[in-house]
Image: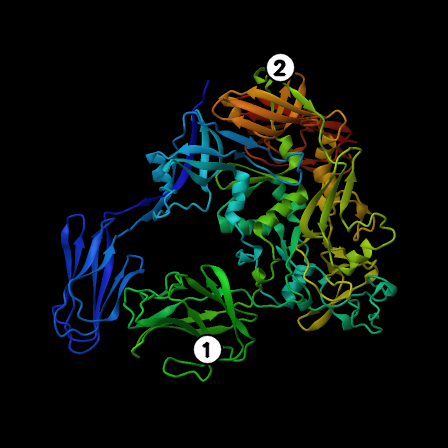
Amino acid sequence: MKREVGIFIGKQTTASPPFCDYTFVLRSDGPTITAQIQLIATNGGGITNTLNYVHQGNNFNEVSQVLSLMSNTTYLIYWYNPGFDMYNVGLQVIDGSGNLVYELPFNTSWINNQQLYYLVPSCGIVGDLDYFKLELFNDEKITVNSTIQNITDISKIYTDFSQGFTIPCSPYNNRIFQHFYQNDVDAIFDYQNRHEAYIEIDTILFRRGKIQLEKANLKNGQENSYSLTFYGAGVSLKDYFNEDKLSQLDYTAVNHQYDSQQVYNRITIDSAVNDYNVRYPLITSKRVWQFGSSVPIPQEDCPDWFIYPPNDTNNIGSSTGVILNTELFPAVRVASIFDLIESKYGITFNGLFLLTDMFKKAFLWFKNKDKLILNGAPVPIDFTNVTYYAIPQTITTFNTSNNTFKIYPATPSTEYTITHTLNIFCTAISPTDPAEFFVDVYKNNVFSQAFTFDTLMPYNLNTTPLTAPFSININNSDTATFTFVVRSNTPNTINFDFRYTRKRIFFGGSVETMKAVANSSQTTSGTTNLSQMAPDMKISDFITGICKEFNMTITSTQKDVFTFDPLTVWYGKGKIRDITKYTDITSIEIERMKLYKSIEFKYQDSECFMNKAFLENPLNIDAHGYGNAKIGFNYDGGDYKIESPFENLLQNNFGNNLQVGYCLNKDFSPYVPKPVLLYMNEVTTLTAGNKYFYNLNGFAQGLSDYIPFGQDTNINSSVGGFLPVSLNFGEEISSFYLVNAPNTLYKLYYSSYLENLYKKKNRLVKVKTILPVSILTTLQLNDRLVIRDKRYLINEMQSDLTTGDVNFTLISDFEEVKPIAVFDGLVTVENKYRTAIYFSNGVVGVLVKKSENARDVILSSSKFTSEGFLDIIVPRNTERIITISLTSQYEDESTDTSFIIINQQ
């Protein structure tokens, strides 16, 4: 039975009022008597308005008239009466947004009975996003491919996408796509970008995502169809970011006052006291730090020219080799960067993993230069006291509402040339002898150029500057909007004059000059400017890289809301569905798994001399980069590589609990690394009374505590206590703990999935089904499917929405579903446990209940209506086995129960 498929596309609606205002500026430089122009409506409305020039002696004069014109009606602007005693005249027509739409040059004389311009007023107002149901061909096949992590390319995270399908060029669809096949149509439909969309089957929501218009198809010279592609939510997440980089985020929420005290606090203060989102790892980009006689690599492995100093200049265990705050680059919490991305793009990131220490203790090192250059946080420049000279009052060049600037363009002509110049003057500053400061220019919100002010420029409007100020020359055709920010390393109050000059230079020698001057007074903050330290990395690559680190999927069932789950967690949330009766059991294909004989997990190659020394060490028999892993399987296949976009900077332990890093190459020169991911550990005290020295407020202070950064961190274990985990893919000797670190990224996030794939009993099974709408519209890619007595994971599904035919590619599933969690505890002490409460697909609530022998056990909640964490406190007691049940309640009123067992002995 054929099903009704509805495809809906979102469009920004516009409301066109019946009338909108246009300003007509009539200008003359002498007694222009009885001169007139007329507006004639070409729809038969005749003469609608007559505009009159004025007689005001021999001086320049202009008169502005605001006319309310009918929207989408064509008006002929017609020079009706030339008058007499004609002098130079001009005409400007300005729309309701202040844009110049027509200009008659200001040197016109003795025009008689001439058609000047056809004006079509348009006053569209952007409204809400409305959805329109597209008309489909009766016989069109709509097929959607769905997969999350395909075994043929396990490093990529996929989503739903449709094969190309066509819709007719019906009058209704033509109105939506505004006759895309005709490029002479001034359409407002954006063909370059994807549009919000969703698909329904028999009026039930199937998927949300976006639609891309690919092309229009003509037959026999006539429009026939449009070709479209539907993309799921995972792909559409990248559409928010385009090519934007981390440097384009607004770091105001995490910028901080920059001085030695603030850096000290962020080196030493424990997260339990102040959980800073910006820290300063002890990583040098300047000197080869040593601690007493302890050095990072032996003298014989150093460059020939280098000898460790016999004095203490590099010895951070001495006041002579004291660490300066200007040697240290900041690191920003990855979770905070996620917050900034959410804020900038109006989206929401969900997922319990984002709330765990495994994610929250990850930091991104902000280094994009060889040495630290402090420019201060940018402060937007506000325009005040704008003065116009000969520019019509209806024209806005300096907008004091949004602090933007744009030129007042002139109509091109062969009779003159046009120049537009913006000069930037500093007129006063306090204190009078500051460090240099900078003015950044943004064009359409994209950085364009920067000016450095290192001396006071005391200019005013009545004097000619002895030295030319900074200038921007702008083309007459440039419609860009400019904004400006000022930044400085220290707090300063700075006054500016922005002077805009427009000139029309006539070939006869005369010059028409118009000016506008805006004043501004801004106070710089002296705070950090993290946007200028951010790694050169696209936001989309950053998100993808973090997902590769923790093997996370991204799913979305709600507009602008995206959920991040590690793959094992995501599969664990799937619902078990028996589809045996919908399966064509007469045509099942069973194939061997086409897998790889080895999978390599690799960080970006590092220039750091520590990493190079590790790579070239004779004991590194397979010559792998630090933290990389190559997992071999007894399988006849090819090689595969999962490559992280981050660099893994090997740290050095001086043997006294002090761990530091070096961003220095083999020649001990600073370099700009690939983006570096770091784990923050717990506050640590140096052993044996050792101290390292830091310059605090001008004095060398001996310090014994610090927050280590590197590959390792401790997290609260679900079974109590701390669990050391690593950012390494492969098992290495920890540079901090100096023992093997087994809890690697591979072990925690990849191993269980891959081990299931490589089991000898695993098969790739292809089946054909016809699913009812109730299952097709609710089936999730992490659901486990049962066919007869076997259970499978979905590798890929291809759905024909019009017929319900669904072809599955399935993987045998041998993983235990909702295994019993067993915790051990002592009878002599209080035990604390934490476990995540995940909602399987379709779950609306989870009830928590403890056994009768656990009346003294404290549960943080007895009912969950959304995912969260269950905290369990078990007091001291006698030996006992405690059972805690977790009963999931589904939308269809069914239930299932899993258990936590606590063995207190």
Q: Is residue 75 left or right of residue 782?
A: left
Number of other residues with Cα within 10 Å of mark 1, as a class: few under 14, some 14 to 19, many 20 or more: some
Coordinates of residue 281 in the picture (x, y in percent): 69, 59
Residue position for label 2: 586
Amino acid type for the residue under numbered disc 1: Pro
Q: Nearer the viewer, mark 2 or mark 1?
A: 2
Q: CA distance from mark 2 to mark 1?
A: 83 Å
Q: Which picture quadrant has residue 783?
A: top right
User: Is residue 816 at least partly visible in the picture?
Assistant: yes
Counting residues from the start of the chain, the first of labels 2 and 1 encountered is 1
Left or right, 42 with reference to 509: left
What element does badge 2 sit on? loop
Q: Is residue 869 left or right of residue 125?
A: right
Q: Are marks 2 and 1 in contact (CB under 8 Å)?
A: no
Q: In the displayed structure, would residue 563 be above or below residue 203? A: below
Q: Residue at x 56, y 55 (%)?
A: 245
Measured from the top left, where is residue 448 in percent x and y? 50, 64
Amino acid at dot 2: Thr
Q: Which residue in the protein does label 1 denote?
A: 469
Give the secondary structure at mark 1.
Answer: loop
Q: Give the answer, above or below, for where 271 lies relative to 288.
A: above
Q: Work out whether residue 642 or residue 739 is closer to the camera in this orientation and state it.
A: 642
Measured as percent of width and height from the top left, residue 662 is found at 75, 61
Name the residue nearer the viewer: 740 or 869: 740
Q: Is residue 312 above or below residue 543?
A: below
Question: Is the residue 422 above or below the residue 868 in the image?
Answer: below
